[in-house]
Image (cartoon, helix red, strand yellow):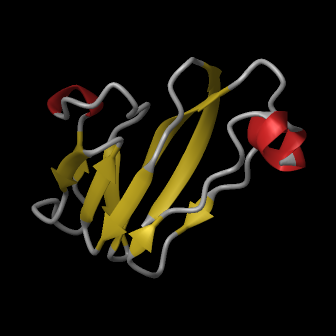
Amino acid sequence: MQITLSPTRAEIPLTLHRAGDVLTVNGEVFDLSGIPEGATLPRDAVACDWLASDITRISGSLQMTILLPHGASAPEETRHPAPLVLTTNGPVALPPYDAEEVSA
């Protein structure tokens, strides 16, 4: 699974969890296993406010863009995040929500 993060100022932090083709976004489960190779699921077909793009499956990998909320003093790594390539299941490590998380 490949996720591009699109930073946006918001008051609610993001949590992601991956289990195969199932992505849990802030506690809401999205089973994406029905997307066949080469297909695209339009963004509007998924009831997820955090999704910022269509979802495609290319070479067996789901690809999408998800909004990355951040605080007012978010660090550089949050404002300009690297894409995520998820190869394991479990909680997804995200850049810190705010600079206070970095110094804590």
Residue 101 image position (x, y, % from top left)? 77, 43
Instruction: Say which residue appears at 51% left-offset and 54% top-offset.
Output: 3
Where residue 90 sits, quadrant-wise, is bottom left
Q: Nearer the viewer, residue 2 or 79?
A: 79
Q: Nearer the viewer, residue 21 or 44?
A: 21
The reply to whether residue 33 is in sight is yes
Residue 59 image position (x, y, % from top left)? 38, 76
The reply to whether residue 80 is in sight is no
Instruction: Say which residue appears at 56% left-offset and 18% top-offset.
Output: 11
- Figure check: 11 above or below 22: above
Residue 49 image position (x, y, % from top left)? 33, 25
Could you tell whether 27 is left or right of 100 in the image? left
Instruction: Say which residue appears at 23% left-offset and 69% top-offset.
Output: 37
The number of numbered badges drawn on the structure is 0
Residue 64 image position (x, y, % from top left)? 43, 48
Where residue 63 sits, quadrant-wise, is bottom left
Q: Residue furthest front?
A: 104
Q: Residue furthest bottom?
A: 88
Image quadrant in which the N terminus is located: bottom left
Could you tell whether 94 is left or right of 99 in the image? left
Could you tell whether 65 is left or right of 32 in the image? right
Could you tell whether 10 is left or right of 37 in the image? right
- Figure check: 38 above or below 64: below
